[in-house]
Amino acid sequence: MKSARILLTAAALLACGAAKAADVACGPSARPQSYAVSLRGSGWLAPEIEFVSEGRQPDHIPNINRVLMLNAVATANLTDRLQGFVKAGLASSRWSTNGSGNGYRSPGRFGYDVGAGLTYWLTPRWGLRLETLYMHHQQSDVPQFEHFTQTVVQVVWRWR
């Protein structure tokens, strides 16, 4: 419960800090029922909160690992419309579900994530983002940490 309060407090601080300008992004990955949603502040070094649902497991285990991440994102303009970024931060899988029936529940310990990607701005307010994330977080079906890589394509909306 303490990890949830820490992340929610961080999300509130991010929302207050991002009031001048921020990006909201969402989109799927290639894995069935997998997606990511994020709120990112503006600037060359900005905070971000991102929620990732890993979707269906490839081995037909009905677990759904859901990860909430609090990241620092460093962005560089590569051209007028293209930005590159790298990011790293804390990750918690506290909101995962265990469908394997073994009774285990993720305690929501913190792990970490790192990622990189590109954002192409179609207009000053709308863009497309390609992002690859590597996550290391507590699994929902066994008491160990999982290593997971996911690539998502997101639609981005910027407000100022």
Image (cartoon, rainbow, N blue to C red):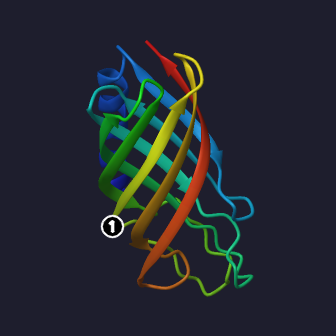
Give percent across and percent down for residue 30.
69, 61
Please identify the quadrant where the N terminus is shown.
bottom left
The one nearer the camera, 152 or 10, is 152
Q: Give SS at disc 1.
A: strand
Give percent across and percent down for residue 105.
51, 75
In this orientation, does residue 78 appear? Answer: yes
Left or right side of 95 for 153: right
Residue 99 falls in which quadrant of the image?
bottom right
Give percent across and percent down for residue 98.
61, 74
Residues packed near mark 1 inside 10 Å, few (<14), some (14 to 19) or many (20 plus): some
Look at 61% across and 47% down and name the residue there: 153
Look at 41% across and 35% down and name the residue there: 83
Residue 114 falls in which quadrant of the image?
bottom left
Q: Is residue 48 above or below residue 111?
A: above
The one nearer the camera, 10 or 125, is 125
Q: Which residue lies most toward the front here?
A: 79
Residue 75 falls in which quadrant of the image?
top left
Q: Which residue lies most toward the left here?
A: 45
Mark 1, residue position: 111
Look at 39% across and 56% down and name the residue there: 115
Look at 65% across and 57% down and name the residue there: 29
Please identify the quadrant where the C terminus is shown.
top left
Give percent across and percent down for residue 129.
54, 41
In this orientation, does residue 107 appear? Answer: no
Kind of residue indicated by mark 1: Gly
Q: Is residue 48 above or below residue 51?
A: above
Left or right side of 103 for 12: left
Count of numbered tags: 1
